């Protein structure tokens, strides 16, 4: 805990000692000259941005599916404890393992969200 407090204190001290440089305004003439160029660049980048947003949405859906599959863990624990007398221990254990795998997959998908945003689609298999 002390280490965390020290890191926060040093970060705040650094922020006050070396503040970020304030923003400067651009004169209107330069802005008028650069605006058409910026619009052309935005038009050229549009398909890549759209593809990146679509892949990001697919990645969010994958994270959501994995979050739903995390409910296998409590269901499996329920089957392992309360229904073990009826021979449900093994199936409960399978559900616990599936939930653990879903946790790992969710972690990987969350780490890959920035990659999805760049327009790269990664298929980690189906579950």
Image: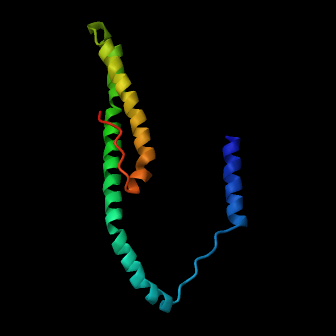
Depicted 8 relative to depicted 30: above or below: above
Q: Nearer the viewer, residue 46 or 1?
A: 46
**In the rendered image, which quarter is residue 36 located in?**
bottom left
Q: Is residue 1 left or right of residue 77?
A: right
Query: Looking at the figure, which quarter contains the N terminus?
Result: top right
**In the rendered image, which quarter is residue 89 located in?**
top left
**In the rendered image, which quarter is residue 102 located in?**
top left
Depicted 12 relative to depicted 64: above or below: below
Q: Position of residue 116 (x, y in %)?
A: 39, 52
- For the point 31% across and 46% down, the residue is 61
Query: Looking at the figure, which quarter contains the C terminus?
Result: top left
Q: Position of residue 12 (x, y in %)?
A: 67, 58
- For the point 35% across and 18% down, the residue is 93
Q: Nearer the viewer, residue 5 or 111?
A: 111
Question: How many numbered marks appear?
Answer: 0
Q: Is residue 13 left or right of residue 73?
A: right
- For the point 32% across and 36% down, the residue is 125
Q: Nearer the viewer, residue 120 or 69?
A: 120
């Amino acid at each position: 805990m002390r280490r965390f407090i020290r890191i926060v204190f040093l970060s705040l001290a650094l922020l006050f000692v070396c503040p970020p440089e304030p923003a400067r305004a651009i004169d209107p003439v330069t802005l008028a000259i650069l605006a058409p160029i910026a619009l052309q660049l935005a038009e050229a980048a549009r398909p890549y941005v759209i593809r990146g947003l679509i892949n990001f949405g697919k990645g969010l859906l994958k994270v959501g599916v994995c979050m739903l599959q995390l409910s296998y863990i409590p269901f499996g624990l329920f089957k392992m404890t309360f229904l073990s007398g009826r021979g449900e221990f093994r199936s409960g254990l399978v559900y616990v393992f599936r939930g653990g795998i879903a946790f790992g997959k969710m972690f990987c998908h969350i780490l890959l969200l920035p990659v999805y945003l760049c327009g790269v689609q990664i298929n980690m298999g189906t579950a």
